[in-house]
């Protein structure tokens, strides 16, 4: 339909639950349908999902993670590890990517793709994000003492952090506290986080003026990708693997990669 001369398309995500011996009240029926709806949205939206035993087990695990996350954070079970970034031309380490990990005393190793989406639905993601930045700054100082200078650390930023008006001040305060040069921190954001936040460019401009670097992760998976690349102050793009893996044999993928690189080098940033 048309709104103010703009054509708007509406899709629907549907969660379906059927009464059973265990799902036999309106409360459990609605809760089960809501769980199914969550999974329908997670699988790309505009689809439907039935509530079944597999979802029941996953929902139970999700609740357990949600209940234990704050305690795990306070007990240092959620920590930061660093993956080296290597220049394949020189075979030397030029940076590292900060990765969040959860080593639970009760549940074992919990992958980030299981607990980060849950954290993003609460203020926990803000606390986790601040810890990752704090630990990254400490690591840079530790490495400098060992003689490893000018190493850039890439830190992932969630959509929730980008929506927080205090985020630029938190980044500035943390870097100043540890006396870290802004150009040694590269904030990694996804296209989705940018597209869903009307204040994203303003937030990024503030930090870019401060001297922080930016990278777009999973580039090419969102909408209006090239337009965002030209508009935003990014230093680096991590083109999605779906384009990279076949670019030597698929001319369309090769053109997308080449165009993305050209836009990066000709953008105002």
Image (cartoon, grey):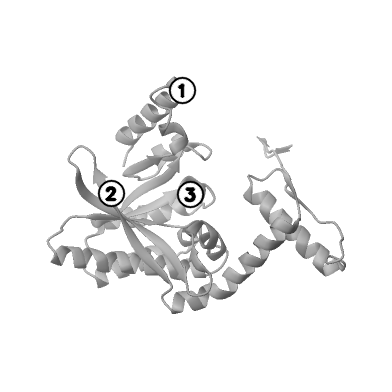
Residue 253 is drawn in which quadrant?
Answer: top left
Numbered tag placed on residue 85 in the rendering: 2
- Per the image, the residue denoted by label 1 is 252
Q: Is residue 252 visible?
A: yes
Q: CA distance from mark 2 to mark 3?
A: 25 Å
Q: Is residue 241 above or below residue 24?
A: above
Coordinates of residue 239 in the picture (x, y in percent): 40, 38
Q: Nearer the viewer, residue 89 or 205?
A: 89
Q: Nearer the viewer, residue 237 or 148?
A: 148
Q: Residue at x 24, y 56 (%)?
A: 184
- The spot of residue 56 in percent (x, y) is 71, 61
Residue drawn at the location 38% of the way across and 42% of the way down = 238
Residue pictured at 45% horizontal, 67% vertical: 102
Q: Position of residue 213 (x, y in %)?
A: 30, 51
Who is closer to the viewer here, 257 or 28?
28
* Precedes in sequence: disc 2 or disc 3: 2
Q: Earlier in the sequence, mark 1 or mark 2?
A: 2
From the image, tell me which residue sits under label 3: 194
Side (left or right) of 20 relative to 195? right
Which label sits in the foreground, 1 or 2? 2
Local crowd size for mark 1, using a 10 Å CA cut-off: few (<14), some (14–19), many (≥20): few
Q: Are marks 2 and 3 in contact (CB under 8 Å)?
A: no
> Along the polypeptide, which appears first: circle 3 or circle 1?
3
- Location of the C terminus (image quadrant): top left
Q: Total number of numbered labels? A: 3
Note whether residue 166 is visible: no
């Amino acid at each position: 339909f048309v709104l103010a001369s703009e054509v708007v398309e509406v899709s629907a995500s549907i969660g379906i639950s059927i009464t059973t011996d265990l799902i036999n009240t309106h409360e459990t029926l609605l809760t089960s349908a809501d769980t199914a709806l969550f999974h329908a949205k997670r699988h790309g939206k505009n689809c439907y999902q039935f509530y079944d035993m597999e979802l029941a087990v996953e929902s139970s695990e999700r609740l357990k993670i949600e209940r234990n996350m704050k305690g795990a954070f306070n007990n240092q079970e959620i920590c930061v590890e660093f993956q080296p970034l290597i220049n394949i031309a020189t075979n030397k380490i030029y940076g590292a990517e900060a990765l969040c990990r959860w080593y639970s005393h009760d549940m074992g190793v919990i992958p980030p793709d299981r607990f980060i989406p849950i954290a993003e639905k609460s203020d926990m993601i803000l606390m986790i994000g601040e810890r990752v930045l704090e630990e990254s700054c400490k690591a840079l100082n530790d490495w400098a003492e060992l003689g490893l200078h000018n190493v850039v650390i890439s830190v992932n930023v969630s959509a929730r952090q980008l929506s927080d008006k205090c985020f630029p001040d938190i980044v500035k305060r943390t870097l100043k506290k540890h006396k870290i040069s802004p150009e040694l921190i590269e904030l990694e954001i996804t296209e989705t986080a940018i597209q869903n936040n009307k204040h994203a460019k303003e937030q990024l401009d503030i930090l870019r003026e401060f001297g922080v670097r930016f990278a777009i992760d999973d580039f090419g998976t969102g909408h209006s990708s090239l337009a965002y690349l030209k508009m935003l102050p990014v230093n680096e793009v991590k083109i999605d693997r779906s384009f990279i893996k076949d670019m030597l044999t698929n001319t369309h993928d090769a053109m997308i990669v080449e165009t993305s690189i050209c836009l990066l080098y000709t953008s105002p940033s």
